Amino acid sequence: MAPIRAIVFDMDGVLIDAKEWHYEALNRALGLLGHAISRYDHIATYDGLPTRKKLEMLSLERGLPRQLHAFINSLKQQYTLQIVHNECKPMFQHEFALSTLKADGLRLAVASNSVRASVELMMERASLTPYLDVILSNQDVEHAKPHPEIFQVAMRRLGVAPSETLVLEDNPHGIEAGRASGAHVMVVQRPEDVVYDRIVERIRAAETAGAVA
């Protein structure tokens, strides 16, 4: 079987515990216009989707005027960046994992449904940027997850085949995208699960069995 040569990480829920930040920022923006998303709906339906997709769903399901999308999206991004500046901090286990994987000779990427400014800022605040060969946002592709395009672009830029790639994802949209790309997928529940030993164990399983989990 092909050896694993690259790892592509999702960001929110994998490297950064940002789900609540996105929920808070979007609801703050929506609240100015008399709209809101419940925490249950955010986790069950909207989690992992780009803001523009969430707003389109709100227009279809709840009558949110489409002419307000750009304004709400802009506000949401501003609020998100404010929260990131205040809350995003390095996690030792992630710095250790990525630096050691890099030293092992693996190529590393982040592929997120968030906008570029958020991705770059979170990676910088988490002190992970130096270990990444590729950083992709939803602005770098035409189709966001659950479409596999962002993982396909990441693999092309990393110069690896799907059989040589391990994707780390936590939510159904990202897991679907990772599997559709042909890569091996490691499903995690929360950022605390992303540790070097677990990643190496999943790499060995993929190389031994050649199975996509």
Image (cartoon, rainbow, N blue to C red):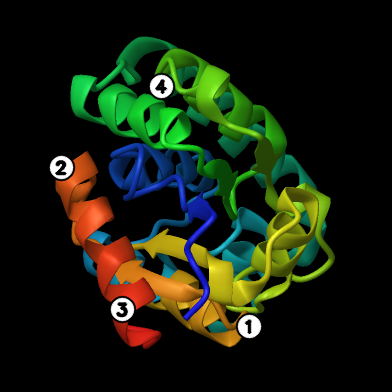
Residue 117 falls in image quadrant? top right
Mark 2 vs 4: CB contact within 8 A: no
Question: Is residue 49 left or right of 67 when viewed as pictured?
Answer: left
Return the mark for residue 192: 2
| Disc assigned to residue 60 | 1
Give whichever of discs 4 and 1 has the lower sequence position: 1
Contact, CB < 8 Å: mark 2 with mark 3? no
Among the 4 quarters of the image, the one containing residue 195: top left
What's the amino acid at mark 1? Leu
Q: Amino acid at mark 4?
A: Ile
Of discs 4 and 3, which sits in the foreground?
3
Q: In front: 68, or 142?
A: 142
Is the residue marked by circle 2 packed among few (<14), some (14-19), or many (20+) residues within 10 Å? some
Front-lying residue, 138 or 56: 138
Secondary structure category for the residue under label 2:
helix
Please indicate whether residue 39 sits to the left or right of residue 1 in the image: left
In this view, 181 is above or below 95: below
Give the structural element (helix, strand or loop) at label 4.
Answer: helix
